[in-house]
Image (tube, rainbow, N blue to C red):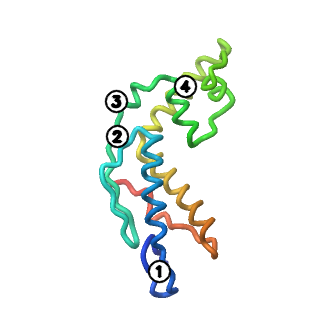
Amino acid sequence: MRRAFLCGDDTYSGKNYDHRRGWVESLLFELEAVFAIDVAAFAVMSNHLHVVLCIDIETANRWSDREVLEQWHKLFKGDELTQKFAKGELVEAHEVNRLRHSIAIYRSRLCDISCQCFQKSALLKRADSKASESRRYLYRSFLGRSV
């Protein structure tokens, strides 16, 4: 059996992982500011996490195309075309359909709980990897489960 601690004291190694509680809390609110998903409640336990999320589809639908790209680019690079449009530069006529398609995909992903959970998991793994001497990762069992 694999032992893993999200937070609290690991009695086997004697290490304390309470600093991760702050990571989780700040990350949840950071992602809430990007995604059209509100954090209604959360609880960080020693070996797992409970999160109650509310999808705010109305907010995502009110975003202009440029706002969708601005939100997306807070976490992801996008491509040259979406970056060009977000900066206010002119887009060629033959690129408009591809741009609209990208914006539609990004808008749907910005209100997708799976995408938000995947990003949360990836960011926590990176933070844990940087902070851990043994370069261990938080295990997937802590993050990204649908309720």
| Quadrant of the frame with the C terminus | bottom left
Tell me which residue sits at (42%, 45%) in the image. 32
Q: CA distance from mark 2 to mark 3?
A: 9 Å
Please, what secondary structure does the residue beneath circle 2 have?
A: strand
> x, y percentage for residue 138?
52, 67
Judge by depth and name the residue closer to the eye, 115 or 88.
Answer: 88
In the displayed structure, would residue 70 be above or below residue 3? above
Q: Which residue is mark 3?
A: 58
Q: Which residue is mark 4?
A: 101
* Dot placed on the residue nearer the N-terminal end, 2 or 4: 2
> x, y percentage for residue 28?
43, 52
Mark 1 residue type = Met
Q: 10 Å neighbourhood of mark 3: few (<14), some, or many (≥20)? A: few
Looking at the rendered image, the disc whose residue lies closer to the viewer, 1 or 2, is: 2
Q: CA distance from mark 2 to mark 4?
A: 22 Å
Q: Which mark is residue 1?
A: 1
Q: Which mark is residue 129?
A: none
Mark 4 residue type = His
Judge by depth and name the residue closer to the eye, 89 or 108.
Answer: 89
> x, y percentage for residue 58?
34, 29
Please, what secondary structure does the residue beneath circle 3 have?
A: helix
Mark 2 residue type = Ile
Tell me which residue sits at (54%, 36%) in the image. 72
Q: Which residue is mark 2?
A: 55
Please, what secondary structure does the residue beneath circle 4 have?
A: helix
Q: 10 Å neighbourhood of mark 1: few (<14), some, or many (≥20)? A: few
* Dot placed on the residue nearer the N-terminal end, 1 or 2: 1
Tell me which residue sits at (50%, 67%) in the image. 139
CB under 8 Å between discs 2 and 3: no
Q: CA distance from mark 1 to mark 2?
A: 35 Å
* Dot placed on the residue nearer the N-terminal end, 3 or 4: 3
CB under 8 Å between discs 3 and 4: no
